[in-house]
Each structure stands twice: as C-alpha cells, then as structure tokens.
Amino acid sequence: MTSLIKIPAEGTKIIPGQPTPDNPIIPFIEGDGIGVDITPVMKKVVDAAVAKAYGGKKKISWMEVYAGEKSTQLYGPDVWLPKDTLDACKEYSVSIKGPMTTPVGGGIRSLNVALRQELDLYQCVRPVRYFKGVPSPLKNPELTDMVIYRENTEDIYAGIEWANGTDPCRKVIKFLQEEMGVTKIRFPETSGIGIKPVSVEGTERLVRAAIRYAIDNKRKSVTIVHKGNIMKFTEGNFRDSAYALAKREFGGVEIDGGPWLKLPADKGGIVIKDAIADAFLQQILLRPAEYDVIATTNLNGDYISDALAAQVGGIGIAPGANISDKYACFEATHGTAPKYAGQDKVNPGSLILSAEMMLRHLGWREAADLIVKSMEAAIGDKIVTYDFARLMDGAKEVSCSAFGDAMIARM
Ligand SMILES: NC(=O)C1=CN([C@@H]2O[C@H](COP(=O)(O)OP(=O)(O)OC[C@H]3O[C@@H](n4cnc5c(N)ncnc54)[C@H](OP(=O)(O)O)[C@@H]3O)[C@@H](O)[C@H]2O)C=CC1
Ligand SMILES: O=C(O)CCC(=O)C(=O)O
Ligand SMILES: [Mg+2]
C-alpha cells in the first residue's frame, strides 16, 4: 500500500532516550466526530505556547496520520487503522490523537484500544485536578487531585469475546462445561462469553510506573483499586501482585497488620493501600482528599476516569496519555461526542491539556506552563464553552475555536 502520509519538509524524529530536538515531527490523528473541531484548536494553542515560550527557537512540525473514518475515506472502505499510521507512531515515538468511534454491539473493535495494544502503551495516565472557576457538583472540588494509572493492555477490555449463538461461542461454552467443570452459566444457549486476562507482569509494570510517579512527584499514597473480592484470580491477582511488587522492589513494610504498606523514607514514605472498586467510587465523592495516585485495571480505570472527571467539571477538560517504555500517544479521556461533531462547539480543553502533558513529556515545561496559565486565565475570566457555561452564572459562552483564541490571548 502506498503511504499517504506527507512527511514535513522540516523537522527531526524524536529518538527515545535522547534529548528532544528543537523541531520535532509529531504525528497526529485528527479523530472522528468532534475530532474535526478540537484537533485544529489544540494544534493552534500548542503552536502559540511553544512560539511564546521559546521565541521561535523551538517548533513542532505536525504530521497528519490517518485512522478511523478519515482513513477509510483515504485508504479504502475497510482500512480503519493503516500499518502506515502504526509505523509512524512508532518511528516518531511521540504522537497525539483525537477520539475515534467504536460501534456498540457489533462492527469494528475499538481502534483506540488497538492502537494501545499495537504499541504496547501499557500505562493510561489520566491526571484529575481542579481548575479554579470551573463548575463542579462538589462543594470543595479542589480536594479532588488524583492521577489515575490505568492498566491499558489487559482485562476484559482486550476484546477476547464471542457472540452468543455462534459456533465459536458454543465451542467455548462446551469446553467450559465439559472440560473445566463449569456449571454456573445460567443460560448457555444465549450467553455471550468474554475473557478477562490479568497477569502478574502486566500488573507489575503498571504498578511500578504508578509508584515511581508517586515517589518522583512527592505524592502521599498509591491506592490499588480492584474488585478482587468477586473476581479473585483477575482483580484479586492485580491487588496481590501490586502489594508483592511494592514490598519486593520498593521496600514496602506492612502497617497496622497489613495489607497496607508504607515505603521507606528515601522513597517518600508513601502509603500503598487498596480499595474495592464500588466502595472507592463512593469514597471519591465523599472523601476525595484521601486519594492521590490510583493504580487500577483497565475497565475500572475507564469508569473511574469519567467519574473523577465529573467531580472537577466533566470530560471536557479531562486529559490523558498512553505510555510505554518507548512510545507515547496522548489523547483526551472523552470520545467523539457525535451530536456535536462539526459544530465548533465543544470544549477543546481535554485535548489541549493532553498536549500539555505531551509538552512536559518532551521536557518543554515552559510551553506546558503557559498552556495551564492561559487556560486558568480564560476560565477565570468566565470565557468558557457550552459545557461550563450552562452551569456557571455570568459566563460568556464561546465556541471551541474562540476558547482556543481566548487562551492564546492570555499567554
Ligand atoms: N479514546 C477515545 O477515542 C474514546 C472514544 N469513545 C467513543 O466515542 C463515541 C461516543 O461515546 P459517548 O459514550 O457518547 O462518550 P463521549 O465522551 O463521546 O461523550 C459523552 C458526553 O460527554 C460530553 N463531552 C464529551 N466530549 C466533550 C467535550 N470535548 N466538551 C464538552 N463536553 C464533552 C458531552 O456531554 P453533554 O451531552 O452533556 O453535552 C457528550 O455528550 C463512542 O463510539 C465511543 O466508543 C469514547 C471514549 C473514548
Ligand atoms: O475505544 C473506545 O471507543 C472507548 C475507550 C474509552 O472509553 C477509554 O479508553 O476511556
Ligand atoms: Mg472511557
């Protein structure tokens, strides 16, 4: 297949482990739905922050790569995630993407998940913090300050499942009943079956990253969130492997008779604790200040991301990063919000803050700080998109692109 990617005339590849060049080439996927609205605004805001922070000495050369609906228009009706795009995300190491649509119940599997799996982006890092002035359902939203480390490659999310009534599904059910002695499938004729792999290695690498982050950023605790009372050998395995790793690699010592741990003083004295997912979801509303870094399995992390985002104003400003030991692909927590697609209406904040994480990842702290400062200033002046405006008194509602411009004017 011929490549449709236009490599920018100027710019250099980012090589993992080497300093970021002054003019890196960064692949981006525009995304489906509201991708067409938020991605250009994100690029404009980032370019302005970089220009302002470094006086023209540094610059990103953006390189569009294709996935989702745009890819099917360009590469052919069945080509949703071309090899071209995967290769570019690997070759250029750091990329950013808009959201992509996944149909419910049938059709293609998630392209977002496929990208994470293909690049083995095992950490989904989603910081959740309050921006002054943002409308929130909580009385003290500033107490919510957490960083979610969601395992990104395993769990029921990996997409190993069979549709009810199909031959493969019948075969799996027969195997479970006849060879594994399973008697608890209540309606075997009409059950769909899914598989939930959770490994020790997968858990350890994610939890290691979460604990290292907590140490490096002087956080107070890491909470392992799981449903290990019910799913003992998957979610329970996650909890047990996490505690074992914290003892073995970080010198964690049991407190109050365990299983909670405390790391030694040279590792920040961080507390490693755990919470069962349902109880955790009510505690983050009632006692958010007690939670800090969160390490969790894939599906729990998905639900927790949107729930926590709501506490600080919603998924309109919820950023994220997918990270491996080699590559990083930044993306917002939200999806394609199809009813708003092409209306220049939604909040571009999530993707802009995902780009802010990307700038920090590149070591471009000054530009990242300018993004945060200008977003705080725009919100402080009550210039906001519809999602905040509908909950704020005296707000001036602006479009997606006008919010980006308001940020740029405040840099
Ligand atoms: N990583 C990815 O690419 C993801 C992709 N998806 C996919 O997106 C599609 C749509 O999913 P859906 O469940 O509707 O979830 P979405 O996250 O797309 O949207 C849900 C609601 O969240 C609010 N919202 C989302 N984005 C913004 C924004 N930028 N600014 C302001 N408000 C926003 C809107 O709320 P309101 O209606 O109140 O205005 C919207 O209706 C699905 O195909 C899903 O699979 C979902 C999540 C992640
Ligand atoms: O891939 C999708 O369509 C949904 C993914 C999602 O909700 C997430 O990763 O947070
Ligand atoms: Mg989600």
Image (cartoon, helix red, strand yellow):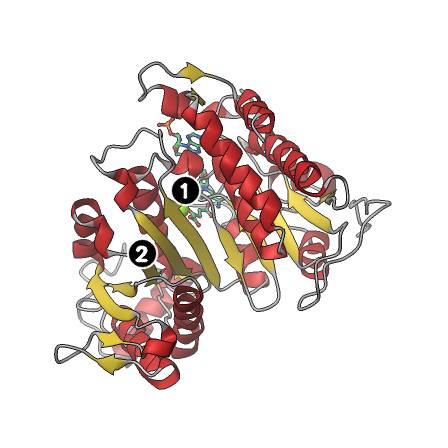
The kind of residue tagged 2 is: Asn
Q: Is residue 398 left or right of residue 267?
A: right
User: Does 118 appear above or below 370?
Assistant: below
Frontmost residue, 402 versus 306:
402
Q: Position of residue 19 (x, y in %)?
A: 70, 63
- Within 10 Å of disc 2 (Cα), the crowding (few <14, some 14-19, many 20+) is many
Please name the residue shown 48% across and 24% down the image: 340
The single residue placed furthest to the right in the displayed view is: 9
The first of marks 2 and 1 along the sequence is 1
The kind of residue tagged 1 is: Val
Q: Which residue is mark 2?
A: 300
- Quick one: SS at disc 1? loop
Quarter occupied by residue 248: bottom left
Q: Is mark 1 within 8 Å of ligand 1?
A: yes
Q: Which residue is mark 1?
A: 104
Frontmost residue, 97 versus 142:
142
Q: Is residue 361 left or right of residue 56?
A: left
Q: Is residue 173 left or right of residue 1?
A: left
- Within 10 Å of disc 1 (Cα), the crowding (few <14, some 14-19, many 20+) is few
Q: Position of residue 219 (x, y in %)?
A: 35, 61
The single residue placed furthest to the bottom in the displayed view is: 248
Q: Quadrant of ligand 1?
A: top left
Q: Is residue 81 visible?
A: yes
- Quick one: SS at disc 2? helix
Q: Position of residue 92 (x, y in %)?
A: 71, 57
Q: Is residue 162 visible?
A: no
The single residue placed furthest to the left in the displayed view is: 257
Frontmost residue, 102 versus 16:
16
User: Does 218 appear above or below 67?
Assistant: below
Please name the residue shown 22% across and 36% down the image: 138
Q: Is residue 241 left or right of residue 85?
A: left
